[in-house]
Amino acid sequence: MSEQAQPFTIEQFYKQILQGKLMGGKCKKCGKIHLPPRPLCDNCFSKEFEWIELPQKGKLLTYTVIHVAPTQFQGMAPYAVGIVQLENGLKIPGMIRGVAPEQIKIGMQLTIDFGTCTATQPWPQWPRYHFKPV
Amino acid sequence: MVAKEKSDLKGKPLVSIVSAGLSKFGKLEGFYAREIFAEAAKEAFDRCPNLDPKKDIKALFVGHMGESYEHQGHTGATMADWAGLLHIPATRTEAACASSAAALISGIYAVLSGLCDVVMVGGVEKMTHRTTPEVTEYLAMASDYPFEQWHGITFPGLFALMATAHMHKYGTTEQHLAMVAVKNHYHGSLNPKAHMQKEITLENALSSRVIAWPLKLYDCSLITDGGSCVILTKPELAKKFTDMPVHIIGSGQASDTIGMYEREGFTSLIAAKLAAKKAYEMADVKPEEMDMAEVHDCFTIAEIIAYEDLGFCKPGEGGRLVESGDTKLGRRIPVNTSGGLKAKGHPVGATGTAQAYEIYLQLTGQANRRQVKDAEIALTHNVGGSGATAAVHIYRRG
């Protein structure tokens, strides 16, 4: 499927994660970049977008270490999650791996890792990217 | 802070509260939500002998967050039925933990529109029969699914992200967080309907097990069963029902992104600030005029952020405000005299109108051991999810 034919949806975002790409939707009218992509620009109400590859590196804005997890994550606890600001300013949350929780610091440089992404399961199950130190 | 101006009461009443009811909060084993709501409704009816519920109440709005707890949706009609109010129109409102503030606002719309002279608004949740992992999963449904829940971020996790950011930016400490818990447990010890009526020490709080660092067990509100309601009417009809009405003089609600990660910052809630601004403007009052407040302390950090968003102190000074003791009963602005979500408990759908119930008791001088002396103006602050919904109401003694 050509990129033009892909709707600007969360499902398409995750399909591209599966291919090792972090993609946003750029509004053709006002230029706002959406992460995740949206079918309707919340800034100018345009429905015209183009895909844009986003930086895979960024800095950690905040984090926590989850000890009490929902049922499906219980086997992984404790695990760290944080919010990363990419080099272009957009923000994205995810797990932080490859570093001991006590060594995680706000402001540290992280990069996205697609390594653990597995095949897409039926909707709404997605491949899970994570972040690791640069 | 500017000194309080006690004498000059401003603000036109939007609606009047003429009665209120609250079930016992706690682990109400063997009771369905509908039975718990009926207990709250019964108290509201008994408090107001001049009210003929079947004749006078024209509509019910009831906040309820989750069908998953009891495998039961369609809450509006269910609660109307079990409160003995068939066949009035009955509607469920859902805005996560702000579900019954949404009910309150719906009730204000109904009365102010002129369509209904008297309405009941309330909320209910039955949670304690579920395991902690199940409740954790159900509560997380109030956050973004594809980017937050899917990546293992829990509800305590979202507020922990705010706590880490607040600590980093302003120097707020884990001790500050614990002080909120100690204060609210003290207030809860004075409330016979609170889930937890036991005082705790700073050491208890700091040494409790980690839920989502830096939040520990005592930083989290309780998984609780409970129901709450208030009866609203037009201000000009209030005296027909009671000599002691409480007027709502300001009402504000605002929304924000469902995904917390999309917001500009993580140390304040824009929706709460906008809702507060609207409510203060409508009531024509200032933060420093509040005699007390019930704020959404779903986690201790949320109360500290609430102080700042509501203008009780400057941004970043919330930790120092709790440390000063000024938000304790008997001090400058008592916050969460009911015990708050922290000690009274947080049956999510019931919380918004449970806050209104506490204000009703306080402004009518019925709060007994936890009475705020001469309370005339007060505020409630109810937050849904990680802040995608916020509602602020301002009340004045009638």
Image (cartoon, helix red, strand yellow):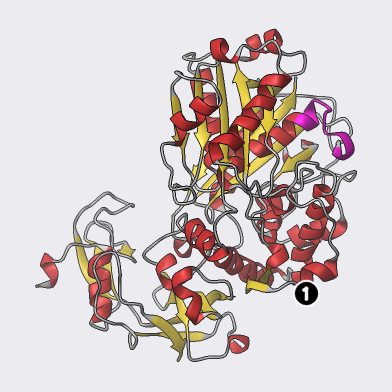
Secondary structure predominantly adopted by residues drawn in magenta: helix
Tell me: B7 left or right of A11. right
Q: Tell me if I can see residue B252 in this picture.
A: no
Boundaries of the magenta span: B361-370
Q: What residue is drawn where x is 61% and y is 40%?
A: B352
Is the residue B223 above or below the residue B331 in the image? below
Q: Position of residue B118 (x, y in %)?
A: 56, 16
Q: Which of A127 and B114 is in front in this view?
A: A127
Q: Tell me if I can see residue B84 in this picture.
A: yes
Q: Is mark 1 on a helix, strand or loop?
A: loop
| Label 1 CA crowd tier, 10 Å (few <14, some 14–19, many 20+) | few
Tell me: A22 left or right of B192. left
Q: Where is residue B141 in the image (x, y as percent from the top left)?
A: 45, 57
> Could you tell me the amino acid type at mark 1?
Ser
Q: Nearer the viewer, residue B232 or A12?
A: B232
Q: What residue is drawn where x is 80% and y is 62%?
A: B179
Is the residue B376 above or below the residue B51 in the image? below
Q: In which quarter of the image is residue B230?
A: top right
Residue identifier under label 1 = B207
Q: Where is residue B290 in the image (x, y as percent from the top left)?
A: 77, 37
Q: In which quarter of the image is the C terminus of chain B?
A: top right
Q: Position of residue A57 (x, y in %)?
A: 40, 83
Q: What chain is tagged by disc 1?
A: B
Is the residue B8 above or below the residue B194 in the image? above
Residue B364 lies within the magenta run: yes
Q: What residue is drawn where x is 52% and y is 33%?
A: B62
Residue B16 lies within the magenta run: no
Residue found at the very far top of the displayed protein:
B240
Tell me: B130 left or right of B73. right
Q: Which of B227 and B296 is in front in this view?
A: B227
